[in-house]
Image (cartoon, rainbow, N blue to C red):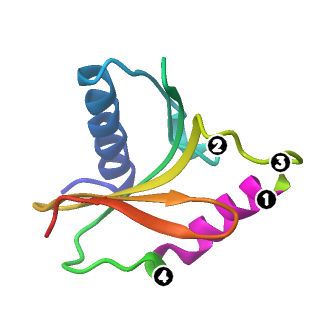
Amino acid sequence: MATNYQRGYATEYRIMKHFKENGIYGLRSPASKGMFDVIGIDETGVYLIQAKRTKKKKLTPSMYRDEIASIKAFVASIPAPMPDFIRVELWVWLDRKGWIKYRITKDKVEEYYNETS
């Protein structure tokens, strides 16, 4: 049986693989020491990704309210408006189903990708 660390690690590496396949340079923040687990950079911008994994059959953003609140506080703390080329996101892997991805701004949480439907 996998530990929580192993499950998180596998989820982060799933993102790293996706980045590599799409020409995005990816960097992991080991042991979740930072707010973002994976950072990606390409010619279109910067991706700041908080990664989660769940076995739940149904997902709602309220399940991750603490993480979302921290990310929104981070975005709000930036003195200038967040440039469009910086994407702050929460990616959740639903076991045996796929990704649900949320874009987070200081004002809202918006689902923009769902391969589980």
Q: Kindly report the distance in space between the C-alpha atoms of the residues bearing marks 1 and 3.
A: 5 Å
Within 10 Å of the Cα at label 1, are there few (<14), some (14-19), or many (20+) other Cα atoms? some
Q: Is residue 43 above or below residue 1?
A: above
Give the x, y percent position of residue 21: 23, 22
Q: Kindly report the distance in space between the C-alpha atoms of the residues bearing marks 1 and 4.
A: 19 Å
Q: Is residue 61 above or below residue 23?
A: below
Give the x, y percent position of residue 95: 17, 62
Q: What residue is shown with label 2?
A: 34
Q: Mark 2 or mark 4: name the one nearer the start of the chain.
A: 2
Give the foreground label among 2 and 4. 4
Q: What residue is shown with label 1?
A: 76
Q: Residue furthest left?
A: 96
Within 10 Å of the Cα at label 4, are there few (<14), some (14-19), or many (20+) other Cα atoms? few
Amino acid found under the numbered disc labelled 2: Gly
Give the foreground label among 1 and 2. 1
Q: Mark 4 or mark 3: name the one nearer the start of the chain.
A: 4
Is residue 10 toward the left or the right of residue 41 in the image?
left
Give the foreground label among 2 and 3. 3
Q: Kindly report the distance in space between the C-alpha atoms of the residues bearing marks 2 and 4.
A: 21 Å
Give the foreground label among 4 and 3. 3
Amino acid found under the numbered disc labelled 1: Ala
Q: Are marks 1 and 3 in contact (CB under 8 Å)?
A: yes
Q: Mark 1 or mark 4: name the one nearer the start of the chain.
A: 4
Disc 1, SS: helix
Disc 3, SS: loop
Measuring 59% from the left and 70% from the top, which residue is drawn there? 108
Measuring 53% from the left and 68% from the top, which residue is drawn there? 109
Disc 4, SS: helix
Give the x, y percent position of residue 3: 31, 55
Give the extent of the magenta segment.
64-76
